[in-house]
Image (cartoon, rainbow, N blue to C red):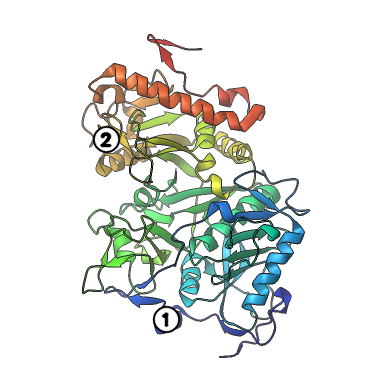
C-alpha cells in the first residue's frame, strides 16, 4: 500500500515512491510477518522469527561519526570506532538509495530520558517482525504525529551490503553507524533486532551525562512498591533479568535505566530476555510472558509441534524473547521508582574465588563498577579450554561513548548522597573453579539478595577477604553454613589462594587501561595478592 498517513520522509531523503506502513498495530505486523514467511506463531501465540546470518550484535562493525558534537567528548578506541563525516555521507547515501521506493514499516516510539521526559524516535525497517520488536521494546510515541520529524531516526536496511567497505571507512559489508550531529542511526546488513535497542542505548549513554548529568545504567531494577528500589548490574549470563524478575517484587525494567534527581526510570517499555534453558519452574514470569505480542528470536520447536524447545541452542546460544513489560504480572506501569536503597553488581566468577555476596564501600563500588568483571567458561567458544576473565567497564562497555570514569564519578556522587548499600554478588562458581567446583544455586542467591534488601544480612558477623579486601557476611537465612566463606568451600586452601592471586592479577592488568586519571582512593580498592600469607603492598 502507499503512504496513506502522508508520512513525510523527505527530511531523511526518501521520496514519495516509498511504500510506508505507518504505525501498524502488533496484530497487523504479526500477520504481515507470517504472510511474508518471516515468522511463525508458537503454541502460546508468540511470533517466532529468525534474524538471519547475525544472531547477535557485531561490535567490530559499530562506528560513531567523528563530527563537531562527538569529536571532543567520545572516548575513541576499539569500542567507539571513529568514522569520518564524508564516509558517513557515503554510507547514508547507500542506505537511502536502497530504501527509497521499497515497502517499509515506520514506527514512531519514544525512550524515557527522565522520570518526566521522553525522546521521540522513528524506526524505519524492511521487516514487520522488527517493528514488532520496536513496539515491545520502546514506549508509545505520546503526542508525536506523522507531520512531525522525530528527534532521532533509525534506518534499518537489513538486506543492504556496503558495495565497498574499505572505501567507506568500515571493515565489513554490514555496519552500524551513529551520528550525534545528524541524530540518526544507520543499521545495514543485519536483521538482529538487538542492534536497534543497543544503538539507542548508546545514544542515551552519550546525551544524558553530557546534557543533563543523569547516570545511564546497564542494569535491571525492581521495587517493593513502598520505595525500596534495587538495581541489578551484570553482563549476559550473570542473572540480571532472572534476579530482577522476582515474584515478591515489582519489575521496573530488566536492562536499561537512568538515575536522575527524582529517582530511577526505565528507558524502555519492554524486556529482551535470553531464552537458553528457560523453564516455567525456573523463571515463571519470563516463561509466562511469552504469549501473543512477544517476539522469539532464533529458537527451535520440538519436532512436529509449535512448542519452543528452549534447550535447543543449535541456531545460537543467544536465543532471545522481546515482550512488553506489561506481560510481567505486577510490573510498574510508570517505569519509574525512587532512588535505590540497594545496588547489586552481579558477576559469574568461574574462578570460584569471590564470596557469594560482599558489601562494598564507595571506593570499592567505583572500582568494581569500572572493572565490570565476569568470566567466560570453557566450551562457550572455540579455543576456550579454561575460565577466562571478562572485564566490561560499568557492566556495559560496548555501549559507552564516554570514558568509564565519567559514569563511575556520577555513580559515586549518587551513592554519597544517600544511604545506599552496594553489593558484589557472585552468581558463578563456589568450591572450586569451573570444571571442579559447582555453580551456586539460584535459590541461595535469591535468599542472599532478599536478606540484603530487608536488612537482615547486615545482622550477620562479617569477615574481610584477605586478597580482595571485600567485607562479606558469614551467615544468611536460607543458605547453608559455610557457603558464604569461599575459603571454606575449597578442599585445598593453597589452591584457593593461588587462584585468588591469579584473578587479582587480572583485575590489576585490566585497570591499567584507565590510565592515571583515576583518583588514588579508587585504585587503592584493588585486590592485593598474597605471598607466603602476607599481603603484597
Q: Name the residue rendered at 72%, 60% in the picture.
A: 87
In percent of width and height, residue 211 lies at: 70, 51
Q: Name the residue rendered at 72%, 66% in the picture.
A: 90
Quick one: 58 or 447, which is closer to the camera? 58
The residue under label 1 is 27
The residue under label 2 is 435
Toward which corner of the image does residue 129 lie, by quadrant? bottom left
Give the number of the mark in front: 2 or 1.
Answer: 2
Q: Name the residue rendered at 30%, 66% in the picture.
A: 300
Instruction: Let me know if residue 116 appears in the view.
Output: no
Quick one: 116 or 411, which is closer to the camera? 411
Q: Quadrant of the N terminus?
A: bottom right
Up-down relation of residue 52 to residue 280 (above or below): below
Q: Is residue 211 left or right of residue 188?
A: right
Instruction: Let me know if residue 324 appears in the view.
Output: yes
Up-down relation of residue 233 to residue 191 (above or below): above
Q: Residue furthest right?
A: 68
In percent of width and height, residue 96 lies at: 67, 74
In percent of width and height, residue 279 lies at: 25, 58
In percent of width and height, residue 275 lies at: 33, 58
Q: Residues within 10 Å of mark 1 (few under 14, many from 20)?
A: few
Q: Is residue 373 left or right of residue 84?
A: left
Q: Residues within 10 Å of mark 2 (few under 14, many from 20)?
A: some
Judged from the image, the secondary structure of the residue bearing numbered disc 2 is loop
Q: Is residue 396 left or right of residue 427?
A: right
Q: Are marks 2 and 1 in contact (CB under 8 Å)?
A: no
Could you tell me how far apart the alpha carbons at marks 2 and 1 are, in whole angstroms?
47 Å
State which tag comes first along the sequence, 2 or 1.
Answer: 1
Amino acid at each position: 500500500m502507499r503512504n496513506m498517513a502522508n508520512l513525510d520522509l523527505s527530511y531523511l531523503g526518501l521520496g514519495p515512491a516509498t511504500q510506508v506502513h505507518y504505525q501498524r498495530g502488533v496484530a497487523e505486523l504479526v500477520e504481515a510477518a507470517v504472510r511474508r514467511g518471516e515468522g511463525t506463531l508458537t503454541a502460546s501465540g508468540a511470533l517466532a522469527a529468525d534474524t538471519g546470518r547475525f544472531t547477535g550484535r557485531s561490535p567490530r562493525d559499530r562506528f560513531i561519526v567523528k563530527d563537531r558534537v562527538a569529536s571532543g567528548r567520545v572516548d575513541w578506541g576499539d569500542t567507539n570506532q571513529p568514522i569520518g563525516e564524508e564516509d558517513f555521507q557515503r554510507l547514508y547515501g547507500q542506505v537511502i538509495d536502497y530504501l527509497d521506493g521499497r515497502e517499509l514499516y515506520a514506527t514512531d516510539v519514544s525512550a524515557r530520558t527522565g522520570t518526566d521526559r521522553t525522546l521521540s524516535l522513528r524506526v524505519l525497517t524492511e521487516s514487520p517482525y522488527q517493528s514488532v520488536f520496536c513496539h515491545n521494546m520502546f514506549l508509545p510515541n505520546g503526542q508525536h504525529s506523522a507531520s512531525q520529524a522525530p528527534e532521532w531516526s533509525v534506518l534499518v536496511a537489513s538486506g543492504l551490503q556496503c558495495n565497498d567497505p574499505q572505501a567507506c571507512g568500515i571493515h565489513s559489508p554490514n555496519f552500524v553507524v551513529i551520528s550525534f550531529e545528524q541524530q540518526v542511526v544507520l543499521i545495514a546488513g543485519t536483521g538482529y533486532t538487538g542492534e536497534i535497542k543497543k544503538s539507542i542505548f548508546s545514544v542515551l549513554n552519550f546525551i544524558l551525562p553530557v546534557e543533563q548529568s543523569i547516570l545511564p545504567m546497564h542494569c535491571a531494577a525492581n521495587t517493593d512498591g513502598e520505595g525500596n528500589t534495587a538495581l541489578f548490574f551484570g553482563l549476559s549470563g550473570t542473572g540480571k533479568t532472572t534476579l530482577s524478575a522476582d515474584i515478591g517484587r515489582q519489575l521496573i525494567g530488566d536492562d536499561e535505566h537512568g538515575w536522575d534527581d527524582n529517582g530511577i526510570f526505565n528507558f524502555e517499555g519492554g524486556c529482551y530476555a535470553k531464552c537458553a534453558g528457560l523453564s516455567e519452574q525456573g523463571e515463571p514470569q519470563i516463561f509466562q510472558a511469552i504469549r501473543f505480542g512477544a517476539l522469539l528470536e532464533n529458537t527451535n520447536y520440538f519436532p512436529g509441534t509449535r512448542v519452543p524447545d528452549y534447550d535447543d541452542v543449535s541456531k545460537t546460544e543467544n536465543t532471545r524473547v522481546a515482550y512488553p513489560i506489561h506481560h510481567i504480572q505486577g510490573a510498574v506501569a510508570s517505569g519509574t521508582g525512587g532512588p535505590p536503597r540497594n545496588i547489586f553488581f552481579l558477576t559469574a566468577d568461574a574462578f570460584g574465588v569471590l564470596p557469594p555476596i560482599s558489601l562494598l564501600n564507595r571506593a570499592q563500588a567505583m572500582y568494581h563498577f569500572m572493572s565490570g568483571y565476569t568470566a567466560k567458561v570453557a566450551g562457550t567458544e572455540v579455543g576456550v579450554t579454561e575460565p577466562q576473565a571478562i572485564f566490561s567497564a560499568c557492566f556495559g562497555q560496548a555501549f559507552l561513548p564516554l570514558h568509564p570514569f565519567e559514569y563511575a564519578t556520577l555513580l559515586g556522587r549518587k551513592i554519597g548522597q544517600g544511604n545506599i548499600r552496594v553489593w558484589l554478588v557472585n552468581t558463578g562458581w563456589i568450591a572450586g573453579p569451573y570444571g571442579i567446583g559447582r555453580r551456586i544455586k539460584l535459590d541461595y542467591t535469591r535468599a542472599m539478595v532478599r536478606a540484603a534488601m530487608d536488612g537482615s544480612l547486615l545482622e550477620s558477623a562479617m569477615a574481610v577477604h584477605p586478597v580482595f579486601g571485600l567485607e562479606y557476611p558469614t551467615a544468611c537465612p536460607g543458605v547453608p553454613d559455610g557457603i558464604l566463606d569461599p575459603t571454606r568451600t575449597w578442599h585445598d586452601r593453597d589452591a584457593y589462594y593461588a587462584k585468588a592471586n591469579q584473578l587479582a592479577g587480572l583485575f590489576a592488568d585490566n585497570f591499567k587501561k584507565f590510565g592515571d586519571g583515576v583518583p588514588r582512593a579508587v585504585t587503592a580498592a584493588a585486590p592485593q595478592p598474597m605471598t607466603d600469607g602476607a599481603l603484597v603492598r
